[in-house]
Amino acid sequence: MRAMEMNQLEGIGWFTHEVMSRIVCRHPEHEFLFLFDRPADPAFRYASNVKIIEKSPRSRHPLLWYLWFEHTVPSILRKEKADLFVSAEMYTSLRLSVPSLITLHDLSILHYPEQVKWSIRKYFFHYYPLFAARAGRIVTVSEYSKKDITERLKVPGEKVDVVYNGAHEAYRPVDAATREQIKAEFAGGKEYFLYVGSLHPRKNIDRLLAAFDRYKRESGSEKKLLLAGRKAWMTGDIKRVYEQMEHRQEVRFLGYQPVSSLARIMAGAWALTYVSLFEGFGIPLLEAMKCGVPCLTSNVSSMPEVAGDAAILVDPLSVEDISRGLSEIDRPGQREKLAARCGAQSRPFSWDQTAARFWQSIQSLT
């Protein structure tokens, strides 16, 4: 439960929260031990059958990861006489005496090792194959990621279960009047493209900014670009491209937004722009479609699988192609056509389904 920090949930944290909150309430016949490496918010004790165990220090470095998973976790499980170990993260322990399940959301570190510190790179290149071999079951979030895991980590396909992500119920369409209010609040009344996610190099923000600048220059459009997410990586290529933009005054960085606000911003968008270099799933794509908002996304990894025909697909390595995609959504009738497909494409994805399938994977260990 290390990714669970109240009011700071992202990616793995949301997955853990949405899945485990449902599972523990649906299965009161079982006791669940939630292991935290820091003080836990009481809100994460979803039901009376949850026991929270806090054990410091915070494991936020490869050496501390090793100590936590190879020493702390096995010790706790032995003391508590646990029957199995379930990780919603990509870690497990090689010293467990009980069956284990891990969740490999993606293998992005293996694809883009240069985007992480050498110590992190070394840790995962060593432990990913060992974790995959040790785990009794592996859960992943797309068919693409399953194929990637089986090929790169040499894991039998029958050991890997695909459990798709869901989207928070706050993501839903709004009426025309509400949409105008949202545009006035966040974009000066103008239409806007939206990016959601951390400003990480893998998210390809530098090329998105360059493509938006080109789009503005060639189209004369009044649309803006809004980016919602932590600015932890607002350096290097992202900062350089932004400072060189001709139309940077049309770009607004919103920072981290809570779900209540982000769902409104998403519902008011002209389109989501999500041209990441690599994704195991890409939850913002689903959140956009739940709002009836079409997507511009990459033609690589899992993104075509998730977005389907409710998106324009582009080459994420080509500024020209991303710019073309922005203009393509502006074509008469195109946005409406894509938006009409969002409901059917997003309908099979829900956190209720995610939790049910995750539980099936857990049950297969017993």
Image (spheres, helix red, strand yellow):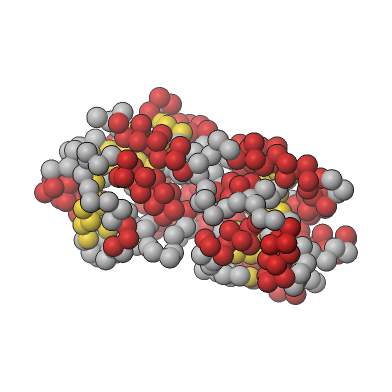
Q: In which quarter of the image is the N terminus?
A: bottom left
Residue 196 locus on image (x, y percent): 60, 58
Tell me, yes or no, if residue 230 can be seen here.
no
**What residue is shown at x 72% (from left), y 45% (from top)?**
339
In the rendered image, residue 321, in percent from the top left (x then y), is placed at 78, 49
Camera-side residue: 348 or 173? 173
Q: Where is residue 280 in the image (x, y as percent from the top left)?
A: 52, 43
Residue at x 64% of width, y 36% of height: 344
| Closer to the camera in the image, 60 or 49 | 49
**What residue is rendered at 70% in x and 39% in y?**
341
Depicted 303 relative to depicted 67: above or below: above
Q: In which quarter of the image is residue 216?
A: bottom right
Horizontal side, residue 44 vs residue 262: left or right: left
- The residue lying toward the viewer, choosing from 66 and 168, is 168
Number of numbered discs: 0
Kindly tell me whether residue 189 is visible in this rendering.
Answer: yes
**Where 251 falls versus 333 (above or below)?**
below
Above or below, 1 against 301 in this view is below
Relative image position of residue 345 (x, y in whole percent): 63, 37
Quarter occupied by residue 362? top left
If the image is split into quadrants, where does the C terminus sit? top left
Give above or below for 136 relative to 196: above
Residue in front for this viewpoint, 129 or 106: 106
From the viewer's perspective, is 142 left or right of 72? right
Give the residue at x 88% y 60%: 219
